Image (tube, rainbow, N blue to C red):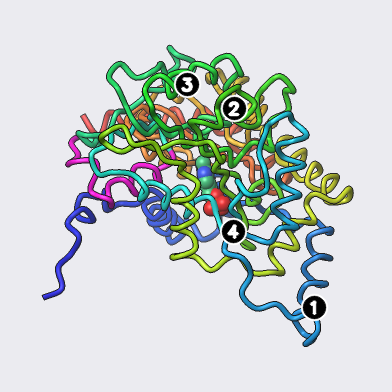
């Protein structure tokens, strides 16, 4: 008899975005005349940088000729790309990362989902709340979290991000072993200073813990004082693995390319004080379960580091940040407390009401879709996330609709609450 991994039954069955899609389908059914504007999902809208397109075409042509054709590549990625990453993303910023520390992949989502399998079942995992759901769900699938009650798993340590701590969690009160940090943060848009990040590195050093640092949105950091990599903090290479992606920086969400950094001196332990270098285990995992990213895609990623590529990527980031500024300014002027949108593509808005109620009221009165904060965790209960990944004109139109209908939105919420009680 084929038996289910029972951990899968512990997952929250209503995945946030399918729930949103269902409400949207219903709305569109009754309002076919409204042009819906989606400001929920964090998917890019602008085409790939021209430098990447040129590199893709060239690489595809190479695949058409016997002399230049490529079969399987190295599981860790081609050296030309690993060298460019180490040089441009790390050495230039004073971080001591070598090409051998870099593992090219087809996405940060799968890397971060897979990484936890290197660790024992009985480790204590800490995640921020609100959180990118992948960190939690993959630990649930691995059977590491116990059961959930009121959207919280018993054996996970939740690091609360609230207006009181400016969405930057305190260090855990009880010891933890694996810490997921994400900066700039999805969903709050919050960033972290070097000094604040130093505290986490120090904690990990003192507790023999490991930080999984998700820097998928680092390209949006504008403030030169903010760290773009955890390796800008001294000794972080011993206690941190970093994940980066070309998805949001260069618009690769549909092309798929990312990388994970496992520094040579990063350590993992066994029960009786055995100390091992973590990198070899990730290498073993990847060479067994992964066959590398396609050659044309790696060529496209490499083109990101060319002079034109850098300029074009900057153009994309500026474009989305301009959208973010429009959104943040509008919601602030309507009296909402907002974070993010300055060094991040997400704006986290305190709507002081149940987030699904606000979602429904916004959709009903304006045809604009946001993401309800509760989907990211209990601490997201009264927040919504607006994504700046959108066409500029669509953003302007959405904001006009919201400003013009703000009273109606509030009225709708009031009615909803009255009807419910
Ligand atoms: N990490 C965070 C915090 C994200 O928000 C996302 C995508 O939305 C990812 C990782 C996934 O990136 P990728 O497209 O490289 O899988």
Q: Quadrant of the C terminus?
A: top left
154 with respect to 45 (left or right): left
Q: With respect to residue 50, does 67 lie above or below?
A: below
- One can see residue 338 in this view: yes
Reading the chain from its start, which is encountered first: label 2 or label 1? 1
First in sequence: mark 2 vs mark 3: 3
Q: Toward the viewer: 70 or 195?
A: 70
Residue at image mark 4 = 76
**Residue nearest the viewer, comparing 21 with 379:** 379
| Residue 145 highlighted magenta (yes or no) | yes
Residue contact at pointers 3 and 1, CB within 8 angstroms:
no
Q: Which residue position holds label 2?
A: 340
Query: How far is mark 2 from mark 1, CA to CA?
Result: 43 Å
Q: Residue at x 78, y 34 (%)?
A: 92
From this viewpoint, which residue is outermost toward the right?
Answer: 307
Furthest toward the bottom, the residue is 66
Residue at 60 percent across and 44 percent down: it is 244
Q: Quick one: label 4 or label 2, which is nearer the N terminus?
A: 4
**In the rendering, at what x and y percent does residue 9 appear?**
19, 55
Element on which disc 2 rests:
strand
Q: Is residue 420 left or right of residue 321?
A: left
Residue 357 visible in rendering: no
Callout 1: helix, strand or loop?
helix
x and y, in percent, of residue 119 in the image:
33, 44
Label 4: few (<14), some (14–19) or many (≥20) C-alpha neighbours in 10 Å: many
Magenta-drawn segment: 132-149
Q: Which mark is residue 200?
A: 3
Q: Secondary structure at mark 3?
A: helix
The answer to whether mark 4 and mark 1 are in CB contact below 8 A is no
- Give whichever of discs 3 and 1 has the lower sequence position: 1
């Amino acid at each position: 008899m084929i038996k289910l991994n029972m951990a899968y039954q512990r997952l929250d069955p209503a995945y946030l975005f399918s729930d949103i899609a269902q409400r949207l389908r219903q709305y569109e059914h009754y309002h076919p005349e409204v042009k819906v504007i989606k400001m929920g999902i964090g998917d890019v809208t602008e085409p790939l940088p021209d430098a990447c397109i040129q590199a893709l075409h060239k690489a595809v042509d190479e695949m058409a000729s016997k002399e230049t054709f490529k079969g399987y590549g190295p599981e860790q990625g081609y050296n030309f790309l690993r060298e460019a990453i180490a040089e441009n993303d790390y050495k230039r910023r004073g971080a001591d990362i070598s090409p051998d520390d870099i593992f090219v992949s087809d996405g940060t989502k799968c890397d971060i989902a897979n990484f936890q399998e290197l660790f024992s079942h009985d480790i204590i995992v800490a995640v921020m709340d609100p959180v990118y759901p992948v960190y939690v769900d993959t630990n649930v699938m691995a059977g590491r979290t116990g059961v959930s009650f009121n959207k919280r798993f018993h054996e996970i340590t939740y690091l609360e991000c609230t207006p009181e701590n400016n969405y930057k969690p305190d260090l855990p009160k009880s010891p933890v072993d694996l810490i997921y940090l994400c900066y700039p943060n999805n969903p709050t848009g919050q960033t972290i200073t070097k000094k604040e990040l130093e505290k986490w590195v120090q904690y990990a050093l003192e507790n023999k813990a490991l930080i999984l640092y998700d820097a998928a949105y680092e390209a949006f950091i504008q403030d030169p004082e903010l760290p773009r990599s955890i390796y800008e903090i001294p000794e972080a290479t011993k206690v941190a693995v970093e994940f980066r992606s070309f998805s949001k920086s260069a618009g690769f969400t549909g092309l798929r390319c990312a990388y994970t950094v496992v520094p040579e001196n990063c350590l993992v332990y066994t029960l009786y004080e055995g100390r091992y270098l973590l990198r070899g285990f990730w290498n073993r995992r990847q060479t067994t379960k992964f066959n590398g990213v396609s050659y044309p895609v790696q060529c496209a990623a490499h083109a990101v580091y060319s002079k034109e590529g850098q300029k074009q990527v900057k153009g994309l980031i500026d474009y989305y940040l301009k959208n973010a500024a429009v959104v943040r300014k509008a919601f602030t002027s309507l009296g909402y407390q907002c974070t993010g949108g300055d060094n991040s593509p997400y704006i986290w808005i305190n709507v002081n009401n149940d987030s699904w109620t606000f979602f429904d009221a916004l959709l009903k009165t304006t045809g604009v879709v946001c993401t309800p904060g509760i989907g990211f965790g209990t601490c997201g209960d009264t927040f919504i996330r607006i994504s700046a990944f959108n066409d500029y004109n669509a953003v302007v139109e959405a904001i006009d609709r919201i400003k013009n209908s703000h009273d109606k939105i509030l009225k709708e919420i009031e009615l909803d609450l009255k009807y419910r009680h």
